[in-house]
Amino acid sequence: MTSELLSKAEKTKRFILEKAAPLFNQKGYAGTSLSDIMEVTGLTKGGIYGNFKNKDEIALQAFDFNIEVLYDAFRDAIRLHKDALTKLQTILGFHKSIMYHPVLVSGCPILNTAVEADDTHPELKVRVIKALNIWKEGIVYIINKGKEKGQIKEKINADKYADIFISLIEGGLMMTKTYHNKKHLNNCYEHINHIIQNELKK
């Protein structure tokens, strides 16, 4: 929806999310306080809670906002290609690029939120699972389309390889972020490329 069509209240909510979403992605749910949100928005407590019931609601919608930004950029990159194998390589290249040139502050919101949400915030965990499922469904769709077009081997189990790709990508991002060393993500990048060329390609 364009900003011209939004009501004043909707514009204020959008503004709060635009400012709060990077905070939650960088500092996490527990690490982000109402004072932090007030500081980045310039709004009072009443101004924030006049638009959201509580911090939980802001956190949930901030995660959705971050995923929307990430997936919009992701889809734009995928649409540039028609071949299934190239689309898969683009998925890998996109997630490698967000480590070096992040679309969002502090990188992938799925990685940043998953562990904390698992221990402390069941509703946020549901959002993470939903985001992962959407990502996985996209990879499965690309692989199955590649099989239909004769680009990918018919015997390939799309569900299995989607799990492998996501695990390698998220694991590589986690290792690189933890060690501040690009070699970990590069190793995963090379391995997925090997899988695409030697196991998937018909």
Image (cartoon, rainbow, N blue to C red):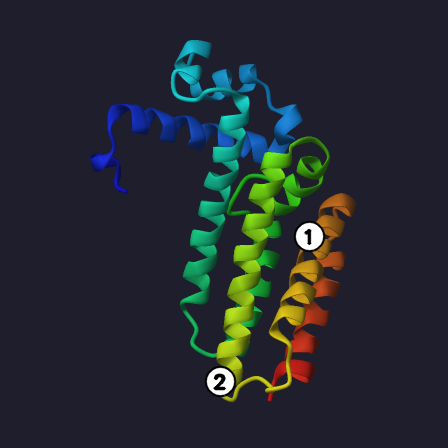
Position of residue 165 in the picture relative to residue 46 (left or right): right
Q: Residue at x 60, y 40 (%)?
A: 106
Observer-nearest of 80 and 152: 152
At label 2, the amino acid type is: Glu
Depicted 185 relative to depicted 27: above or below: below
**Mark before the other along the chain sequence, 2 or 1:** 2
Q: Is residue 71 left or right of residue 162?
A: left
Say few, some or many: other residues with alpha carbon within 10 Å of mark 1 (under 14 / 14 to 19 / 20 or more). many
Image check: 42 left or right of 182?
Answer: left
Residues tagged 2 and 1 counted as in contact (Cβ below 8 A): no
Three-letter code, disc 1: Leu
From the viewer's side, name the closer residue of 113 and 183.
113
Where residue 113 appears, as percent x and y from the top left, is 64, 39
Give residue 6's position: percent from left, percent from top. 25, 33
Which residue is at a point 55% across and 69% down the rendered structure image?
A: 140
Horizontal and vertical percent position of residue 63: 52, 38
Disc number for residue 148: 2
Q: Is residue 141 above or below residue 22?
A: below
Observer-side mark, 2 or 1, equals 2
State the SS at label 2.
helix
**Number of residues whose C-alpha sits closer than 10 Å to that of mark 2, classed few (under 14), some (14–19) or many (20 or more):** few
Question: Dot 1 corresponds to which residue?
Answer: 173
